[in-house]
Amino acid sequence: MQENAIKIPGERIENVILLVRGQKVIIDADLAILYDVPTKALNQAVKRNRKRFPADFMFQLTPQEKNELVTICDRFQRLKHSSVLPRAFTEQGVAMLSTVLNSNRAIEVNIEVMRAFVRLRQMLLTNKDLSRRLDELEKKYDARFRVVFEAIRELMKPPKLPDVPNKKIGFTLKEKQSGYSRRRVKEKQA
């Protein structure tokens, strides 16, 4: 490997992988930080290559999902007042993203992200294996150990997120749109 290769700890990548709609994904803002590009540039590259990102590679969060994400994860507070809905990239979407960004850093980050997804998959398989073994042990031992087995099963369950209602705080201002639109700015530049 090269001397100036990028060193990204696996834990850092594993911490940005989220479970959304039953899929393990990474949000565009986190990917932009990893790839060391602005989020806007990352999303523009995706828009230019939209055919490469079908729904099972990438999807846009709903406003409710965005609000839940902001509520749960402190690192997404900057998205709280953004009008743009974040994109979520699956493992295949991240792989495709490295081909779209086409830089050495994108390739190296992609390799580390793929390794993180593989480690998570192995952990899930290990968890299933542990659950199966626990079932076998539970059959062998009598009711005195049932409490222990139930406690272990509770520890193996993923944590449940609290149901927090999203209340709108503040006020909304309804004004006419300003005279500065993208079209006028582009016309002035031309």
Image (cartoon, helix red, strand yellow):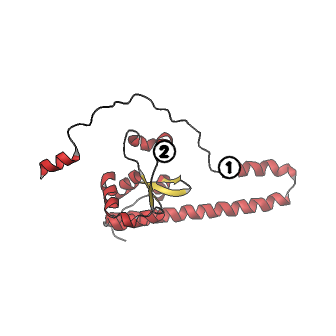
Residue 36 seen from this side? no
**Residue 63 horizontal/vertical position (percent):** 45, 44
Residue marked by disc 1: 155
Q: Residue at x 39, y 43 (%)?
A: 79
Q: Which mark is residue 69?
A: 2
User: Which of the 4 image quadrants contains residue 95?
Assistant: bottom left
Q: Which mark is residue 8?
A: none
**Horizontal side of residue 120 vs 177, given as left or right:** right
Label 1 sits on a secondary structure element that is helix
Q: CA distance from mark 2 to mark 1?
A: 24 Å
In which quadrant of the rendered image does the N terminus lie? bottom left
Residue that extends furthest to the right in the rendered view of this protein: 142
**Residue 168 horizontal/vertical position (percent):** 46, 32
Label 2 sits on a secondary structure element that is helix
Q: Nearer the viewer, mark 2 or mark 1?
A: 2
**Horizontal side of residue 165 vs 157, given as left or right:** left
